Image: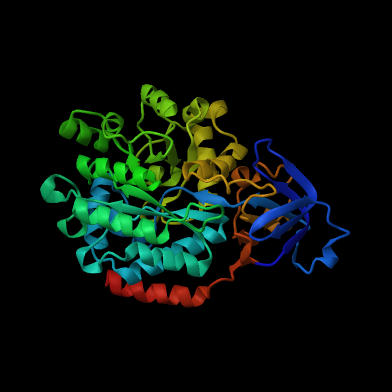
Amino acid sequence: MGKLVIKRLKAIVSCDANDTVYENADMLIEDNKIAYIGDMTDGIRRMGASMIDGRNMICYPGLINTHHHFYQYFSRNLPQVQNMELFDWLKTLYEIWKGIDREIVYCSSALAMTELMKWGCTTAFDHHYVFPKAAGHLLIDEQFRAADALGMRFAASRGSMDLSKKDGGLPPDSVVQTVDEILEDSRRLAAEYHDASFGSMRTLALAPCSPFSVSGELMKQSALLARELGLRLHTHLAETKDEENYTLARFGMKPYDYIESLGWTGSDVWYAHGIHFTDDELIRIAKSGSGVAHCPISNMKLASGVAKVPRMLELGIPVGLAVDGSASNDGSNLLEELRVGYLLHRLTSAEKAPSGYDMLKMATVGGAKLLGRGDIGHIAPGMAADMFLVDTRRAELVGAALDPKNMLATVGLKAPVDYAIINGRVTIAHRRVITQDEASLARRGREAVARYLG
């Protein structure tokens, strides 16, 4: 890949360890990495580089989404589930989700990633765990195809469920698999797609769904396989009181005690939600090195509760930000999540709440830590070139850019980012995706939805 120069950026909010904010600086991107930040006035013309005029622009590290369910993009805003909480919501929607196929997974993944990208997300983790027997086993492959076409840095999971209704779980029989089927496909996907090198565009985690849809044996075997293959581990945990009642009744343990008994703690593990952890559990989580993906909008919509994020941060627990499934959020906008999360914790924790800049770092540095990445999450020479630019001349930002570190949480962004760059490649320009034909993708998606929902 060639060279790209971004000229005279108004500010670069680096989110580095020193919280550096560069002012009136140039940036050189070369070979997919940030090569230089500073004054390049004398050398730009001789470099033969592509250029972006950064005057009036603020540059931020690309956001990192740490928990999603792309397949839910086509089951949003359905009236029959609007006022439900998690267990009833899941049981109702499983009757729809059991109809997904490869085309549904490709289109929903591509459109969810398109929306994420338009709002500054450059790395997306997805937790896919629904594998209808009629759909075959190549659903994660379709997600990788969609990410490749868009130029999104993609962290996939081989999610799984092996407990159906007849076994005491929530999902129907048609979407669960055996432990052997799950482990075999996990090995295949790891061999074919997982890349642990610097700047990798493709990684894989193993992610059994939740304590109420998978067996203890699947959890144990997944942990053993992940550690054998050098993969990370992810699952839902402590999302609702119903989950807590389920594990107490079935295993005689609360969710965290149960997961701990199965070997699911450590710096290679992160949990989605973590709303109902006690303070004692949070202290144990901090000691273990495990992390949490915080999903404020989903938690609010499903009336699940408010995660104790201020306490998590105080204890040093790695915390990332996430949109969660499109159907429990009705969107895929991590910048909106950042602002809503900031306001939610101001409401519930007052002066102990994370600042707007803390929320930004959660969505960048925190996300990189959860995914085990040291090459993304902040801006510095030598880092992978993932970032987005916001033009401060837009009407809704007039008078709002005096504090660029906090602006995205306190004021927010009411329209897509002006530019996004992923791995040194421009993917959004002038607020539009340029790696795919958005209109064609949307049309293909509408056709898929019409067939899917009937």
Q: Residue 98, image x and y in percent? A: 23, 62
Write down the quadrant of residue 194 in the picture: bottom left
Write down the quadrant of residue 359 in the picture: top right
Residue visible at 48% across and 27% down?
A: 311
Residue visible at 33% across and 64% down?
A: 139
Q: Residue 343, image x and y in percent? A: 53, 39
**Residue 77 in sight:** no
Q: From the viewer's perspective, tell me whether residue 139 is left or right of residue 418.
A: left
> In front here: 50 or 19?
50
Quick check: 440 above or below 213? Answer: below
Quarter of the figure that contains the C terminus: bottom left
> In front here: 92 or 106?
106
Residue visible at 74% across and 57% down?
A: 28
Quick check: 278 above or below 327? Answer: above
Q: Residue 104, image x and y in percent? A: 34, 69
**Residue 412 in sight:** yes
> In front here: 192 or 205?
192
Quarter of the figure that contains the N terminus: bottom right
Quick check: 112 above or below 356? Answer: below
Q: Residue 71, image x and y in percent? A: 35, 61
